[in-house]
Image: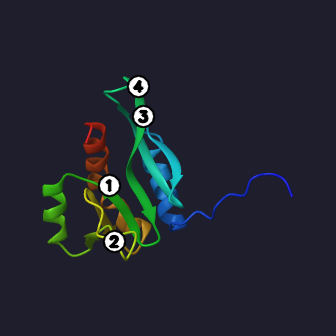
Amino acid sequence: MSGTRRAKEHGDPEIVALLDELLLPLPGVTRRQMMGHPSYLVPVLDLKSGAAKPKMFCCALETGVVLKLPPARIEALLAQEGFSEFAPMADRPPMRGWIVLERESAADIESELALIMEAKAWVESGA
């Protein structure tokens, strides 16, 4: 058998479709599968090479999205219902700088567009 086999893409298809619709038309935003999940990236200038490199700001899950945000913002959000630390491996500590926005549906995700855009801006700033 020849050819390559694609890994199964994880993430709620409705959430992925919504994120594609909202994010991919934005300048510089691309989508790539990372760790099996549809992930959204923006180009960020790498100071060592001087070249723009794609950096992830959002990742679709089966029950919401993962966002990269400043530590103080994450701390404030964790005090609210519907947010949790991002711990992709149960036997390891949560990943710093990332938070899970837990929502039931794509419509619930759409209502959080401002927060998703905040994550995009944070990563674009070189975070």
Q: CA distance from mark 3 to mark 4?
A: 6 Å
Q: How is the image coloured?
A: rainbow
- Count residues near mark 1 (Cα–Cα under 10 Å), then give few for <14, some for 14-19, many for 20+: some
Q: Which residue sits at x=27%, y=37%?
A: 126
Q: Nearer the viewer, residue 122 or 93?
A: 93
Which sits earlier in the primary sequence, circle 3 or circle 1? 3
> What residue is pinned by disc 4?
51
Taking the image as shown, residue 50 lies to the left or right of residue 25, namely left
Q: Quadrant of the N terminus?
A: bottom right
Kindly indicate whether the residue at mark 1 contacts the one at mark 3 (C-beta within 8 angstroms).
no
Kindly indicate whether the residue at mark 3 contacts the one at mark 2 (C-beta within 8 angstroms).
no
Query: In this rendering, is residue 86 above or below 6?
Result: below
Residue 108 location (% of width, % of height)? 35, 68
Q: Which mark is residue 113?
A: 1
Q: Could you tell me which secondary element the residue under label 3 belongs to?
A: strand
Q: Is residue 117 at least partly visible in the picture? A: yes
Kindly indicate whether the residue at mark 4 contacts the one at mark 3 (C-beta within 8 angstroms).
yes
- Count residues near mark 2 (Cα–Cα under 10 Å), then give few for <14, some for 14-19, many for 20+: few
Residue 120 location (% of width, % of height)? 32, 45
Q: Which residue sits at x=13%, y=56%?
A: 72
Q: Nearer the viewer, mark 1 or mark 2?
A: 2
> What residue is pinned by disc 2?
92
Q: Which amino acid, mark 4?
A: Ala
Q: Which amino acid, mark 2?
A: Arg
- Count residues near mark 4 (Cα–Cα under 10 Å), then give few for <14, some for 14-19, many for 20+: few
Q: Nearer the viewer, residue 21 or 38?
A: 38
